[in-house]
Image (cartoon, grey):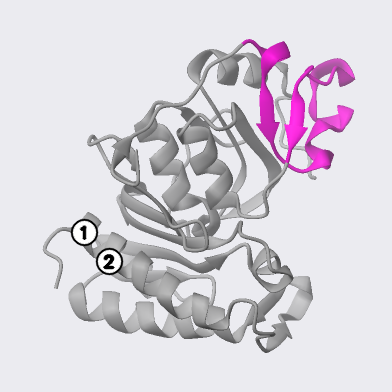
Amino acid sequence: MPETDLALLTAAARRSGEIALRFFGKDPDVTNKPDGAGPVTEADLAVNTMLEQFLGAARPDYGWLSEETEDGTARLGTKRQFVIDPIDGTRGFIEGSKDWGHSLAIVEEGQVICAAVYMPVRDILFAASRGGGATRNDVPIAPTDPAIHDATILGAKVNLDPKFWKDGLVPPVKRTFRSSLAYRLCLVADGSFDGMMTFRPSWEWDIAAGALIASEAGAVVTDQTNTPLRFNNPHPQVPGVLVAGPELHAGLAARLEPGPAKA
């Protein structure tokens, strides 16, 4: 059994990829969750079962928060918590995209202390520990920090709606998209793109691992109101996410409306 929390998460992430790839491209069973919460496949559930068993056996005193496990209050009384998305980007997984992965984090006192995001089709493993920097396949990574007019931002088209921006002035950025929120955060961390934004309430399991990886790489990570993120909330959502290098983040945050408009 891996000795450190980070080694445990990276081992679990790779195991997750082995399981998910058995289903990928093979028309897995899909169920739509209630209340428009999106699809879940038999691969999501198989990975979740393995993670609950593997991580739970290694750290039985840690709390548990996963997209595919019914939430309760028990995790709120634990010192540390696993925050897990068994497959982040399930729609992309169903469609045959390469841009889905496994997002695994450990939280202590509201802060992520270690994280792993694994993209199995691409065989890319992002990892970070608090104070220890961030890596992509064991190579240290860092974000870019261009001027706003030179920036390419990952996010849905709705995030450039004038309602989010002071006086309706949308920043002059280029926009592109990836289906996995965790992957978007990591692509800012490694400098592939200059920033990411989402102004929808964001589930902790989608963003916890990527948030640490981005911040340890050197990016600034906040919610839509320019407030640092906290995790293991009773209702496990935060009000959007804004991530970029320090100067770009400051420029974007200064242009945002102060209140969290809804996407």
* Res 236 seen here: no
Does the stretch in magenta take in 17? no
Q: What is the three-letter code of the residue carrying label 2?
A: Ala
Give the side of residue 168 with respect to residue 90, left or right. Answer: right
Q: Quadrant of the N terminus?
A: bottom left
Could you tell me which residue is drawn at 32 percent across and 57 percent down? Answer: 106
Q: What is the three-letter code of the residue carrying label 1?
A: Ala
User: Where 229 sits versus 253, above or below?
Assistant: below
Residue 11: numbered disc: 2
Q: Quadrant of residue 37?
A: bottom right
**Numbered disc 2: secondary structure:** helix
How packed is label 2: few (under 14 Cα within 10 Å), some, or many (20 or more)? some
Q: Nearer the viewer, residue 239 or 97?
A: 97
User: Where 220 sits versus 250, above or below?
Assistant: below
Q: Quadrant of residue 223?
A: top right
Residue 7: numbered disc: 1
* Res 28 seen here: yes
Could you tell me which residue is drawn at 61 percent across and 59 percent down? Answer: 98
- Extent of the magenta region: 147-176
User: Where 154 sits versus 11, above or below?
Assistant: above
User: Where 239 sits versus 206, above or below?
Assistant: above
